Amino acid sequence: MNASRHRRDETLETLRGRDGDAARRSPPPAPIGLPVARADGRAKVTGEARYVADLTLPGLCHARLLRSPYAHARVVSIDTTAAAAHPGVVAVVTAADLPDVHLVYGHAVADHPLIADGKVRYAGEPVAGVVAEDLATATEALALIEVTYEPLPHVVDAAAALAPEAPVLHAKAGEQRPHRGFEEDIARAHPNVCSRSVQAWGDIEEAFGRAAVVVEGTYRYPMAYAYAMEPYTAMASFEAGGLTVWTSAQHPYMVRDDLARCFGLPLSAVRVVVPYVGGGYGSKSYTKIEPLTAALALRARRPVRLALSVEEAILTTRGDAATVSVRTAFDAEGRILGRDARIVLNSGAYAENSPLVARKAANRLGGPYRIPALRVESLAVYTNTAPASSFRGFGAPQATFAGESQMDEAAARLGLDALELRRRNLLSPGEPPWAKARGFDADLAADLDLAARELGWGAAAPGHGQAICVSMSDAGSEPITTAIVRVHHDGSVTLMCGSTEIGQGSATVLAQIAAGEMGVDLARVHFLNSDTAAVSYDRSTGASRTTTLMGLAIQAAARDARAQLCGWAQETLAPDGPAVVEERGGVRIGDRVHDWGAVVRAWFGTASGEVVGRGYLRRSGATAEMPPFYELGCVGIDVSVDEETGVIRVDRMVTIGDVGCAINPRLAEAQDVGAAIMGLGMAMREELLYDEAGNLLNGNLFDYRVPRFSDVPEMRPLLAERRDGVGPYGAKGGGEGALNPVAAAIANAVERAAGIRLREAPFTPERVWRALRERDSR
Amino acid sequence: MTLSIGTRVRFAVNGIPVGAEGPGSRRLLDVLRDDLGLTGTKEGCGEGECGACSVLLDGRVVNSCLVPIDQVEGCDVRTVEALSEDARLGLLRDAFLRSGAVQCGFCTPGMLASAAAFLGSGRKPSDENVREAIAGNICRCTGYTKIVEAIRVAAEDGEALDVSVAAAPAPDVAGSRAVVQAMPGLAPQRAPIPPAVDPARPNVVRPRTLDEALEALARDAHRPLAGGTDLMVALEAGVADSSVPLLDLWSLDELRGIAVVAAEDASGTPYLEIGALTTYADLRSSPIVQEHLPAFGAMAATVGAAQIQNRGTIGGNVVNASPAGDTLPLLLATDAVIVAASVRGTRPIRASGFWTGYRRTALAKDELVTRIRVPLPAGRPTRYRKVGTRRAQSIAKASVALSWRAGEDGAWRDVRVALGAVAERVIRAPRTEGLLEGARPSATLAGEAARLVVTEITPIDDVRSTAEYRRHVVGRVLRRMILDEIAGGPPAGEGLRR
Ligand SMILES: Cc1cc2nc3c(=O)[nH]c(=O)nc-3n(C[C@H](O)[C@H](O)[C@H](O)COP(=O)(O)OP(=O)(O)OC[C@H]3O[C@@H](n4cnc5c(N)ncnc54)[C@H](O)[C@@H]3O)c2cc1C
Ligand code: FES
Ligand code: FES
């Protein structure tokens, strides 16, 4: 046994005992709370796990896309004759070839043509697709397509896009879709405003009027790329009157809905299958290349695979860059009186999910604090750059960088300890952050204490700086979810649900919940997911919702199965006898115990049959209030700064995963470490850069540097389990929280180490060096 | 001389003999995935950056997206599917599962390949060593800590079991192909045999001797191919002309080897002779380099990561002539000689005259670089330091090589300062050299040198940094190198950090 492993488990145990307060409710049934091995682990370490690019079909063709070299242009003409005549080419497809297809999709605002339709709005937008017998031929044929463009004035910067004379990307507003997820109408105050969200309460003027201290600043969060290692890949086939698409998507049901609309098919005729997925982090939410792949298959009359390169994937979806101008008013004791902010997101050429990111950024800028007066205006702005959409944290990293930086700036001005200032303002458990919201479901003050203890708050080594920052996200998205639990006649269980396993571990955690609820051995539970023709509806896999919401649906389905089984047992095993008593894994009748399999066999009269348990979740009961839960972030950090080169060295990071109940502590912990390191990447280095002409300068892995082994500091991931979430056994979501406060934590720690205030991420050595130089010239 | 059009390249995958068809520049990755259905090995980036395609080639970890099949002839390739047959991989697999080192799993096959190579190397599984061993593999999910832990656990378990002596048993053909498909209606399929002519993939000529190679080069235009870590990336990106056939030097063992050679001229100075095909891994592990030119070993350790170090060659670096190439400043600072050969004969080219402009060299079209000679005068320390964007797998933002003759009086003589990535080619800094010449290093002098050297360079603004910052950093690095000498020599692991 390895010593370090042992130590870690011990710490975990202690913490779970100390802060877990698990005794508050009855202990959850095994295997809940156990660090069982991943259900999909073995397939992944043997190479058996098949991702979309690993699948094939008889007669499969391969596709490549021709992309626009211009940031903004009218497409005057496309000549595909030579390409179509090239030997080995099966089909060449442009918008003109798709009169029977509804070209425009988008779940929030329908504004995105699946292939450029008369106009290109960013450099890299697909203009034509070639389907060929093999990739080499498709690549060759691309060069034979002649496109005439008429370049238009373009704009890459969000602030510039809001100028009165700025070039307009979308002459008419996109149609708003029922899925839009934000309440406001698209205000066309400026035609480049894709959406505008406002979160406001209290009397702002009054709050600032009586402030003892006002901190004010503008904070910039970079245009980042999620970089799932598997680029977007899809394979489509029209057969038997329907469409089947295999894709690396997080939300298969949402993709299904878009496909049905594009191709005029009933939902039942569209099947979206998601095999193993090589990372998502939000970037594979919603529809990406599936409609285009299906359109190519439609014209090719053959199955088609479209596998993007990393470079193309970067041009497909990125995160929203943000400029957050914010001022916060405090009284002399450090209580927040009000916060007034404007968030401008650079959302790229199409809406995608940016309207919702804007909405969430507004909600999350207040943080986990009691704020009497708040006014946040949040704009998603169209620019001639690659479209932005969901990305882990979802408005929270952008907002938290600004909000938590200001907390430390204010603490310094007020002469207060930064943690003390936070304590004075934190929401109490049960307190709603805004009117009609769910009461706060966490004890962040306790999390702060835990982080402070673990970091050694106040005892930084000479030359080092420390900081602890927190975040709060209204998470969980819509509670619209279904699940099916089938108990077979041997008592084993099949769990069917629409949640996608993207590496976060849902296949394992959900099976644990089903095993716990049915009282069967985990090894006898099998999980089937993400095939819209085979499993039932789940709205999405995102917003950290799966364990909580799908968990609740599974609990309901298991309850339904058990209730039916108890009825069956009474009916067939004790028609006149004593009342059936439910037990773990079966029923007791008198002094005899029958497991579920026996009940099924008895009811069907032979070794056959099964029971089907159904679980539904909607805005009602425990999930009536919105948001379904709050996701918390609490990150402590210790840094030093190389004054000569401006290199920030992050030495230690502490994360508190306030997840209510860790169904699988090892997986919960792993999510936090992954999220924190991703946050570190964006805080320190990651940023997509555009030049004046609207070309992406570093859209490849060589220039866009993501963290590697050598960049990772000493990590201390801790879990706080107070069973205070709405989900199963008090669980609530995790997996994004540890990312959100990282940029602010580093900026605040650097201020303590080096006396410079960084308001623009990423904190590249050069930016730090410039700040140091400015400090020295003061 | 063999032309590989239509020929079969024969090698073994997981112990099974296989043959691959098509142009010799086809990627090993495509043969594994498309021809052999071994889809466990993933394609992440196709340019050597991510490591998802890592496999073991004769026991060394390589990026299969950068290996042309022509160079796999007769080799033993191991992929993640070999797990069930290999005791060492088996340990790793279990450790990865137990430690929670797997999330989405996309990086896992490549990660296991790097980890297996590391365990096979017998190096101590210290945190530092493990991190370095896997620096060429990205994982976006886990934040890495669990992977490091898993590899350490496997190494400890392996020691306990002494698996290093357990040879892999004969592979089971059915087992390694048993990639069962869960999706209805989808069976793994053999792709059609790829076309013998692929417009994006040049053909490859594989000479058996240097003379054959030189003859081929004299006759027709060919592009020499060494480790392919620059060339395969250029081909993939479509920036290299794919109609020019490649001249594969990889099997020319006469271009390998590191030796100390006695002086041939009147100077009496011996030199270190390095074959053009010498890889960074060779440089790092060579006791001769360690003894005579440790700065070369330290430099080699900063290039890419294990996958690149196992394939990239000094000859390729020299001819590729990138101003950020890591061997270049050292070769300038040591006044090395690059030996060029053609059917016309052999000629030595001094490093100072070799790089003539941005990515241009003094090499004639029919010439190959065969060897590199680095003089080894007594009492002449050489140092190298590189500034990158991050600590592993980073191209130099700026690099400094410093060499001098230590006088008995403590003064430095014949000082050479060479700089990379700060001009359109690698350059010397003559005014700074003049300042340091004959002086005894001091803090004041170090500061003056830092101020002077920035006036001698013409860095550019690019995505990675501005000229102004590059200037500043070069000055600081030079200053720090001088100060370190005053304090008694370079810190341990020099070159690895910055
Ligand atoms: C991920 C990654 C990381 C990298 N990191 C670094 C780094 O840190 N530092 C660094 O300096 N480089 C780095 N490189 C670049 C590359 O690995 C090196 O330049 C390497 O030394 C090239 O050698 P090679 O044998 O692979 O060259 P090849 O790609 O085979 O050839 C390169 C060029 O040299 C020519 N050539 C090769 N050998 C000869 C010869 N004997 N005679 C004449 N011409 C010849 C070829 O025709 C070609 O034009 C990196 C590359 C990658 C993909
Ligand atoms: S695919 Fe990324 S290194 Fe080969
Ligand atoms: S596990 Fe997903 S990239 Fe490593």
Image: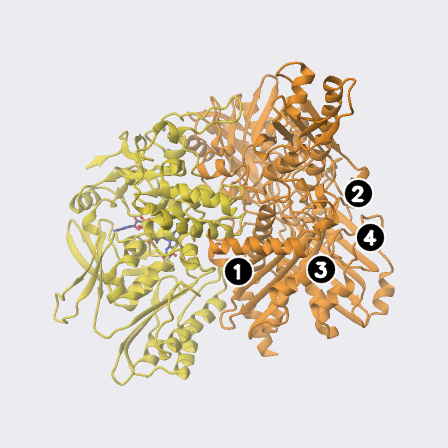
Q: Position of residue A56 (x, y in %)?
A: 48, 27
Choose mark 3 or mark 1, whichever is in front: 3
- Give the spatial CA distance, label 3 vs label 1: 23 Å
What crowding class fits label 2: few (fewer than 14 Cα within 10 Å), some (14-19), or many (20 or more)? few
Q: Are marks 2 and 1 in contact (CB under 8 Å)?
A: no
Left or right: where A134 falls relative to A103:
left
Disc marking residue A185: 2
Question: Label 3: which residue?
Answer: A446
- Indicate the position of residue B235 as horizontal and vertical percent values: 38, 43
Disc on res. A654: none
Q: Nearer the viewer, mark 2 or mark 1?
A: 1
Residue A522 lies left or right of residue B19; in this view the side is right
Tag 1 residue: A714
* SS type, badge 1: strand
Q: Amino acid at mark 3?
A: Ala
- Which chain's residue wears label 2? A
Which amino acid type is shown beneath numbered disc 1?
Answer: Glu
Q: Residue at x 71, y 60 (%)?
A: A446
At label 4, counting other C-alpha atoms closer than 10 Å, the crowd grade (few under 14, some 14-19, many 20 or more) is some
Closer to the chain start, of discs 4 and 3, is 4
Q: Are marks 4 and 1 on the same chain?
A: yes
Q: Of tags 4 and 3, which is closer to the observer?
A: 3
Q: Is residue B307 visible?
A: no
